[in-house]
Amino acid sequence: MELQDRRIIIVGGYGLVGSNIARLISKKHTAIRLILAGRNPQNGEDLAKELNNAETAYVNLDEGFNLSDYGKIDLIITAMEDHGNVLRETAIINGIACITVTEIADEVSPTAFLGLHKTVLAPVVFAGHWQAGILTLVAKQLARKFSHITRIETAGLYDERDPIGPLVASQVNGFVGRALLHEDGKWHFVDAKENAREIHLHDHTSVMGYPMSTLDVPSIAAFTSAANIRFDFAIGKSIGSGQGLEASHDLYIDMEGVLLSGEATKLRTIVSGPKGNSHLTAVGVFLITEAIFGLSGQPTPQKGGLYLPETIISTDDVVSRLKEFGINIIEYIG
């Protein structure tokens, strides 16, 4: 199928995250047609005119989702809450590719079970990781430096100067509560408020981080042997703010273990998105979109099935790819 025949519907397509996704796709792949959908499509008309290859449509998931209302769709991107799994189930039943970015660890089972009972004809990607998988993708590339990893502590630092839309706000409110941790090789659901940890930032200040049930934790556990893995959400001054620039969104990845050289070490990596939280999430969704359609150097589009960001995107050069979007990668050893 030619690119000009591809049509993507972004539900929540004119919100902060959705508009960033739309702009990235439109800029790089002008032949793809975009549908910016939501409850107030008139709010997306200016964005549609800006992009040239986009139109708006009405979608209210509380009323259901009638696929026939939107013509042929090749990919559904969910940039808003979908607690009823309406879009994921529609995608699986109709053989349409789908990317969802809102689910947490104990919300994926309905779709996963449906996928095990149905033949999944197009890629369905669980991207409820922090920033749609950016943190986990980098962690997977970094893990190759180690022969054995004992501990991986990750965190997302939100700067209050960074504007966020209702999608991110609802994620934060929903995530901070019961959290999934991997401790001493065992899985635990814990109360986030009672399991905070101190996170030392780039500028030698400290903030408190609270664990969250993002999909990063089970993903990282699946491709490493680390006995201790957690993801925490923290609020503090970002690298961007510290430099007198716009607020950045900073991801902290701390790995402890034995390098391939045999040296025991601690490796800290900071992934800093200078355009903030919503843009960083959009980059993750964009990379997944390219992988689904075979636009990222892969010879053919991905086959049907259930995927995670790190199982559909090659992590061989993910750090280099992120730098193409202006994302900064900082490493500290020891």
Image (cartoon, rainbow, N blue to C red):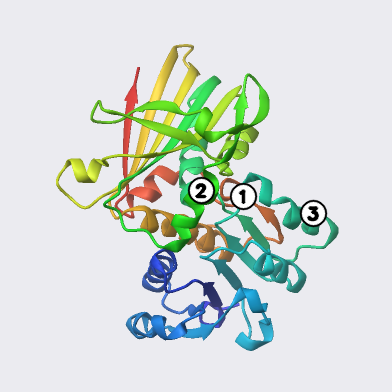
* Tag 3 residue: 113
Left or right of 15? Residue 290 is: right
Check whether the beta carbons of the residues at disc 2 and disc 1 lie within 8 A of each other. Answer: yes
Q: Is residue 299 visible?
A: no
Query: Where is residue 295 shown, x and y percent of the image?
Result: 51, 64
Q: Residue at x 24, y 41 (%)?
A: 239
Q: Which numbered disc, 1 or 3, marks the residue closer to the eye?
A: 3
Q: Amino acid at mark 3?
A: Phe
Considering depth in this image, is 116 or 183 the residue closer to the camera? 183
Name which residue lies at 75% across and 56% down. Answer: 110
| Residue at (56, 28) in percent of width and height | 229
Q: Where is residue 230? Give x, y as percent.
A: 53, 31
- Residue extending furthest toward the left: 244
**Circles 1 and 3: CB atoms closer than 8 Å:** no
> Which circle marks residue 133 in the picture?
2
C-alpha span from label 1 to label 3: 15 Å
Which amino acid is tagged 2?
Answer: Gly
Residue placed furthest toward the right: 117
Instruction: Where is residue 304? Give x, y as percent.
Output: 71, 61
Name the residue carrying label 1: 308
Quarter placement of the C terminus? top left
Q: Is residue 249 left or right of residue 59?
A: left
